[in-house]
């Protein structure tokens, strides 16, 4: 690879990474806008305007110039580089506009990039996916570059991008102007790939949660899987075969669709291997599409716009599968259909595109430093995800238990506050804590695995209980190793709920801790509580924490006291503080109950890092 091509690879990889990050950011910001419109109300003009603006951003490729314009492209790239800085500021409004600019201008840039040199575009797309993986692996699934501390680095990155684009703009590009455009298959295939990568296949935490396997294994495995199609031998043996043999393309499509299906409906090594093979198949099919000449003059703009609209539609449908009680009840349990539709769309695009008339391409050769960089990336990923020893429970002194509804990692103003949530938990110095509204890789919460991030940050172990589509649920963080961990779904008319349990060893004696989230007011919460108490049974001594969505004196709360649990605040004669919302709370719906453990102290944290307050209880250690 000559110097000019290497510089373009670095430039295009950066631009495609910024585009991927902007997709994740704008959909996370939109989640807050739509959430407030549904739960807080009323649906205001900004909710309508923001959705319209997002729709228009997906149509941006239609505005791409018909002829090569290097200087205009350099100006647009410079603007994208500057706009990317805004994404590192933790403010929803700033992030919305920064990501909207990137998506709008980036959509315009994608057309000439994909039409000019599709082989380089394919390499750069893989480079962007690898960079994205490394940034999220390095941040324990929370993209390092989306944090305020990253601002100086991002500003320097923007300067490098601007320098690169103006440098390359000075070079002669007339050789590219006669290149043909690409058809609708490429655009739709790219849209489907973007959905699959940002919602599942490019997220090691999502792959681990779907397959119920170790993130420590899945993160480097997925990185290696994504690096594989970048090798010369893979291209010769697989990508070129896909171009010349229809059976190879059909096989790849079948592997992709079956891999997603097996990943959803099975668990363990079978599901993990199936999802990794699906990733290889998806990337191979897209590289085949990008390396294929479509003999068309200029439908590239329309094809890419249609592909981005497909991406948007799939994401909204996927969001409905998570929020079905409040949007489309028919989408309950239908997430698999959305993923399979995306996989099928990519498989069909790759299979239907006829055997290509190959372009004259620069040989795909990588300098030896690239191979070393790939090995270094794998080594860094293994180092980053290596499990940290969890802090153990102290052998003396009181014990502390807590509950915290973390609101998917957001505060009331929709700042992403997982770091602040971790600080609040660390300050409380708890031995076990029940968490509610825990995401594990949803695009609407920056694709962060809340339980994994908090457990690693706090050096605690975690029991994650999936309740909706594998990637939303509840969790229990605890010190020390759990001697037993189990959970059970609760009958749910609305959003699926569950109860989790860990049995801990406290100075040689067992102690049980249970965490729960009960449904909202239109749910049959008394029945859910009876099922939860049946799950608890006679396991004691025990703590029982959660967001009960029920106030004192309700049937739900009375059932807990009748089962023998004690409210520490009332036992200590403390007027119980309110817990919801976090800012100017008006009601008490979050509790930590104790059974067989005498309470010593109880309080509600002043932290406003979530939309609920954290409840903390300190108990005497049993002799």
Image: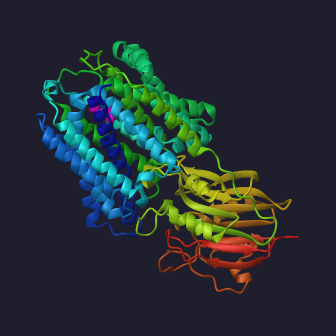
The span shown in magenta is 186-190
- Residue nearest the viewer, comparing 21 with 301: 21
Q: Is residue 481 visible?
A: yes
Q: Position of residue 323 (x, y in %)?
A: 45, 54
- Residue nearest the viewer, comparing 588 with 125: 125
Residue at 52 percent of width and 33 percent of height: 275
Q: Which of the 4 quarters of the picture holds residue 568?
A: bottom right
Residue at 68 percent of width and 67 percent of height: 430
Residue at 71 percent of width and 51 percent of height: 486
Above or below — where is 76 with respect to 228?
A: below
Q: Is residue 402 left or right of residue 251?
A: right
Above or below — where is 270 with respect to 86?
A: above
Q: Position of residue 194 (x, y in %)?
A: 37, 39
Residue at 43 percent of width and 37 percent of height: 130
Q: Is residue 57 visible?
A: no
Q: Which of the 4 quarters of the picture holds residue 235?
A: top left
Q: Is residue 298 left or right of residue 139?
A: left
Above or below — where is 558 with respect to 481?
A: below
């Amino acid at each position: 690879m000559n110097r000019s091509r290497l510089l373009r690879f670095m430039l295009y990889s950066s631009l495609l990474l910024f585009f991927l990050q902007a997709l994740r950011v704008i959909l996370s910001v939109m989640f807050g806008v739509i959430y407030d419109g549904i739960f807080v109300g009323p649906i205001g003009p900004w909710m309508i305007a923001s959705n319209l603006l997002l729709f228009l951003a997906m149509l941006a490729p239609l505005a791409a110039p018909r002829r090569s314009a290097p200087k205009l492209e350099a100006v647009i790239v410079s603007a994208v580089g500057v706009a990317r800085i805004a994404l590192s500021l933790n403010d929803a409004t700033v992030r919305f506009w920064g990501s909207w600019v990137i998506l709008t201008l980036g959509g315009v840039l994608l057309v000439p990039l994909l039409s000019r040199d599709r082989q380089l575009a394919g390499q750069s797309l893989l480079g962007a996916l690898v960079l994205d993986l490394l940034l999220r692996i390095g941040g324990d699934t929370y993209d390092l570059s989306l944090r305020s501390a990253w601002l100086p680095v991002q500003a320097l990155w923007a300067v490098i991008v601007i320098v690169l684009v103006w440098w390359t703009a000075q070079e002669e590009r007339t050789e590219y102007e006669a290149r043909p455009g690409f058809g609708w298959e490429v655009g739709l295939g790219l849209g489907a790939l973007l959905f699959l990568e940002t919602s599942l296949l490019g997220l090691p935490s999502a792959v681990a949660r779907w397959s119920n396997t170790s993130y420590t294994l899945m993160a480097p495995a997925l990185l290696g899987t994504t690096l594989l199609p970048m090798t010369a031998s893979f291209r010769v043996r697989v990508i070129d075969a896909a171009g010349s043999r229809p059976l190879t393309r059909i096989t790849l499509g079948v592997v992709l669709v079956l891999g997603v299906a097996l990943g959803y409906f099975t668990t363990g090594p079978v599901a993990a291997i199936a999802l990794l093979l699906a990733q290889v198949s998806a990337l191979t099919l897209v590289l085949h599409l990008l390396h294929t000449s479509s003999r068309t003059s200029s439908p590239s703009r329309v094809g890419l716009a249609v592909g981005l609209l497909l991406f948007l539609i799939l994401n909204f449908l996927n969001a409905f599968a998570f929020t079905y009680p409040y949007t489309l009840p028919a989408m309950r349990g239908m997430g698999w259909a959305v993923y399979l539709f995306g996989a099928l769309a990519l498989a069909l695009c790759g299979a239907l595109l006829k055997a290509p008339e190959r372009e004259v391409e620069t040989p795909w050769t990588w300098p030896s430093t690239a191979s070393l960089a790939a090995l270094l990336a794998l080594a860094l990923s293994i180092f980053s995800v290596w499990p940290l020893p969890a802090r153990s429970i102290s052998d003396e002194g009181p014990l502390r238990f807590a509950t915290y509804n973390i609101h998917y990692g957001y505060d009331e103003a929709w700042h992403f506050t997982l770091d602040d949530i971790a600080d609040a938990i660390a300050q409380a110095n708890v031995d076990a804590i029940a968490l509610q509204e825990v995401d594990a890789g949803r695009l609407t919460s920056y694709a962060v695995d809340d339980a994994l991030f908090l457990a690693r940050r706090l050096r605690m172990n975690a029991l994650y209980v999936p309740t909706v589509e594998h990637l939303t649920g509840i969790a229990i963080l605890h010190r020390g190793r759990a001697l037993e961990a189990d959970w059970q779904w609760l009958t749910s008319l609305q959003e699926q709920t569950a109860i989790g349990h860990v049995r801990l060893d406290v100075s040689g004696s067992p102690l049980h801790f249970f965490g729960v989230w009960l449904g909202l007011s239109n749910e049959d919460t008394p029945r859910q509580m009876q099922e939860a108490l049946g799950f608890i049974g006679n396991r004691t001594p025990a703590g029982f924490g959660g967001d009960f969505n029920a106030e004192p004196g309700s049937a739900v709360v009375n059932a807990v006291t009748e089962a023998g649990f004690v409210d520490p605040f009332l036992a200590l004669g403390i007027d119980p503080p309110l817990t919801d919302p976090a800012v100017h709370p008006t009601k008490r719906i979050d509790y930590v109950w104790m059974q067989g453990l005498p309470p010593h102290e109880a309080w509600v944290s002043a932290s406003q890092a979530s939309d609920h307050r954290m409840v903390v209880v300190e108990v005497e250690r049993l002799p």
